[in-house]
Amino acid sequence: MSQQSLPKLRRASQILFLGLFLLHLFKTEFRGSLRAVQGEIRLDMPYPAIFLQSDPLVAILNVLSSHALYRGLLWSLTILIPTLFLGRVFCGWICPLGTLNHFFSSWKSERKRGLVRIESNRYKRWQTLKYYILIGGLLAALFGSGILGVMDPISFLVRSLALSILPGLNLGLNAFFDLLYRSDIGALRLLADGLQLLFSQFLLSFKQPYFRQGVFIGLLFLFIIALNLRITRFWCRALCPLGALLGLLSRWSILGLEKHPSHCEDCNRCLLDCQGGDDPIPGAKWRKAECHLCFNCVGDCPESGIKFKFLPATPTTVEGPSLQRRKALASFAAGAAVLPLLRSTPGLAVERHERLIRPPGALDEKHFLDRCIRCGECMKVCPNNALHPTLAEAGLEGLWTPVLVPRIGYCEPSCVLCSQVCPTGAIWEITAVEKGWATGASDTSSKSIRVGTAFYDRGRCLPWAMATECIVCEEWCPTSPKAIYLRPAEVFDAAGNPKQVRQPYVDPERCVGCGACEFACPVQDRPAVYVTSVGESRSKTNQILLRRPRGAAS
Amino acid sequence: MTADPANRRELLLKLLRLGGLSAATAGAAVWFKGRSRRPEETLAATLKHNFAVPPDPSHPEMAVVQGEDPRQLVRRAIEELGGIRRFVARGDVVVVKPNIAWDRTPEQAANTNPLVVAELVRLCKEAGAKKVVVTDVSCNEPRRCFQRSGIAAAARAEGAEVILPEERKFKEVDLRGDVLSAWQVFEPFLAADKMINVPIAKHHSLTGVTLGMKNWYGILGGPRHRLHQRIEESLVDLADFMRPTLTLMDAYRVLIRNGPTGGNIADTALKKTVIASTDPVAVDAYTAKAFWDLDETRLRYLRLAQDRGLGKLKFEDLRTSVVTA
């Protein structure tokens, strides 16, 4: 096959993998089944989060910070090893964010045409920025922070789509269906029902999801996409740490570009559609570490001035990235310094935010921050929309890690989906039985997981403050026996008449911190019962009781 | 005047167009002004739902059936009351309302027994019902409740239409009760010919027990947690709004404590009983007495319901058939 047709093949591959990625993302959601019977509910996908687990950057971060490789991350070898032989094929052929960037780069733009376009596709020094980001991030990982995951392209894409773009789409589509459904015309109502049914199979959520900071996360994504209209694949060329990693790895690859200046007519066409900014043109040196292997250059070349070859003659190639020693050292130092600097605030060590409630299965905070790459898979899959990205609750280093917000959604007792999708083991995979909330969690011998403890605000609680019967919190409490218990009390109403009401109390030995009480409390704006993280079984220090049936100590 | 006639015509046309536009704008403005009103809540639909069938002195008013097979219990109970055809006519849309409130499995007895629901669906289908709808507005995540309770699968297998409580399908209804007025009601409950209530007997710390009348909480959306503040009156208001064709109490596996969520098998007791009646008050009174030894002194709502004319508190006065299946 001639190399001229390789771009077509590449396009097919890009479409295929983007489709697979989206399919995977859509399936990362509990949809329930009216056919299946009861039992433990798991996602019906063989490899949840497979795209994140095949990501070599995620794997290397995991290895550096935890000195081990969490189960599914072995999949990353399927990308890493081909890169050693072929270079950055992942960027050009597979990466879903790369494909989106590629697509939007191909949009016509006034600012990117003719000679400007050709010049903009020549190699630029600022393309080395991504290597410095990578170096800094890897150093930070070595010292115990997965913060670079914020910039991993797969993590970035999952987070942006799951927490912002898809919820927005959901809202928009539903508004349209509602419009149809509210009409007086029967046929339109039927149509609304049909469309709803169709889209709810894969795209729509059963309940509209809302995420804290969704707007900001979405705008950041749109900004990255919009940059393509000025500079082709700016993200991939200048920012992407995974691209940088694969660029470094491609140093020894055996696939290269051979240039034949004698056949070149200086038409510049090879620069017209160049994705990586790697100077495929004869007369300049080809930058192997920048090339995405999109094959547009050989596709566009009217002569035979350039050609990809295995084991090429390489006098016109720059093998690795051209890093400057001083900058590399600076990013080294920055990476090493960033974590101590971030941890010089009291947050992690001595003054944890009381509302930093982590999902069940989460490792203790230090190990959790080691591993969490902020991909948002756990937040996407949570059926109660209970998990949200943090802003400052976990400190700056914990930005966008998951936090349970019981007022929006409580932790469903029998559900362990977040632990099933977490690609790095920050939320270690657990079973419903290990979680232990569905089967009488709180008899004293139980080993259930606890994520926090509930407290009463007696100044707002109806039976405590307003001589009014309520007990909804007790009704919802899922443990057996219930962690919320009631005592009859004689109170006086406004007229001074005595009245019997049942007042709720929390038994901290039984409370698992699920937040159902806070969720269900009828005091709408600031509930009279709320959960804080104290008593979480993952922590040895964040405790109340001298001894708990199974404290973190065991 | 030396105006060119062609130009004059153009000018006239232009003036005509502008005049028309002005008139239309003014007309629209006046029309819109006429519509100007301070925004108000739209008036809720007023409906009362009486699904009861006429009394029939040749049959008992209540049937208490004990036995091993939940399906057999349902069949026998309905036979005792005169057979399903007394309650369901050919072509009826029947709504079966089990309790599917919690994300629990059948052996935890927080939701109605799926076999009881399935058998009821089968009987209704057999009687020629056009459609049998099984639905509830769950407390926990509905899809998990419908799936893990086993009710969705069991009811579908018998040909029922299982409807999840989608946010869109609620309608504001004036319940015209003493404490309940405008409230969100799930639409399938408003579009039925016959309504069969299939609660499960459970412990509840506010009312002592949660039985048939409390099961009507599950037709409501909105902030229903506030109902607990006047729970007795709310229960009666709801029971007054929804008068079922039949109440069939699932007391096969009873949640005797730690209700209404349970969670532990040790909280349940096998009572292997089904109680069916056309009198919703009597069913609750009987069940409370039989399994918890509670009466009207503790369950004030039963007295209130009787005073409202919803049924008989003294279940002993009913024609009752007690059988073993």
Image (cartoon, coloured by chain):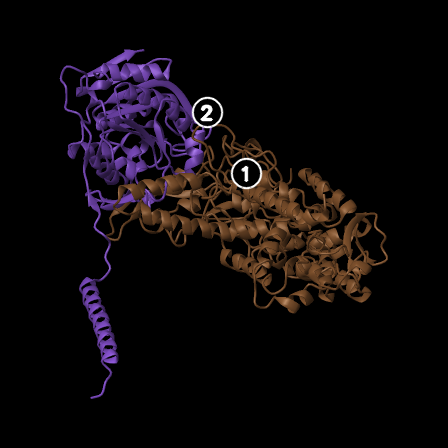
Q: Mark 2, residues whose alpha carbon is within 10 Å: few (<14), some, or many (≥20)? A: some
Residue B313 position within the rendered picture, expressed as x and y whole percent measured from the top left: 20, 27
* Residue B228 in sight from this viewpoint: no
Q: Position of residue A411 (x, y in %)?
A: 49, 42
Q: Disc 2 marks which amino acid?
A: Ala
Residue B154 sits above or below residue A468 on the image? above
- Nearer to us of marks 1 and 2 is 1
Q: Which image quarter is the N terminus of chain A in?
A: top right
Chain coloured purple in the rendered structure: B
The alpha-carbon separation of the residues under discs 1 and 2 comes to 27 Å
Kindly identify which chain the residue marked by label 1 belongs to. A
Pinpoint residue A393: horizontal percent, then vertical percent. Answer: 56, 56
Question: For residue A417, which numbered disc appears in the image?
Answer: 1
Residue at the image position 39 percent from the left and 32 percent from the top: B259
Q: Is residue A510 left or right of residue B25?
A: right
**Front-most of residues B177 and A87:** A87
Q: Are marks 1 and 2 on the same chain?
A: no
Query: Picture quarter containing residue A290?
Result: bottom right
Q: Which mark is residue A216?
A: none
Q: Is residue B154 left or right of residue B172?
A: right
Q: Colour of chain A?
A: brown
Q: Is residue A410 above or below residue A109?
A: above
Is disc 1 placed on a helix, strand or loop? helix
User: In terms of secondary structure, where does tag 2 sit?
Assistant: helix
Subunit that carries the residue with mark 2: B
Mark 2 = which residue?
A: B266
Q: Amino acid at mark 1?
A: Leu
Count every numbered label the image shows and give the total: 2
Q: Foreground residue, A429 or A167?
A: A167
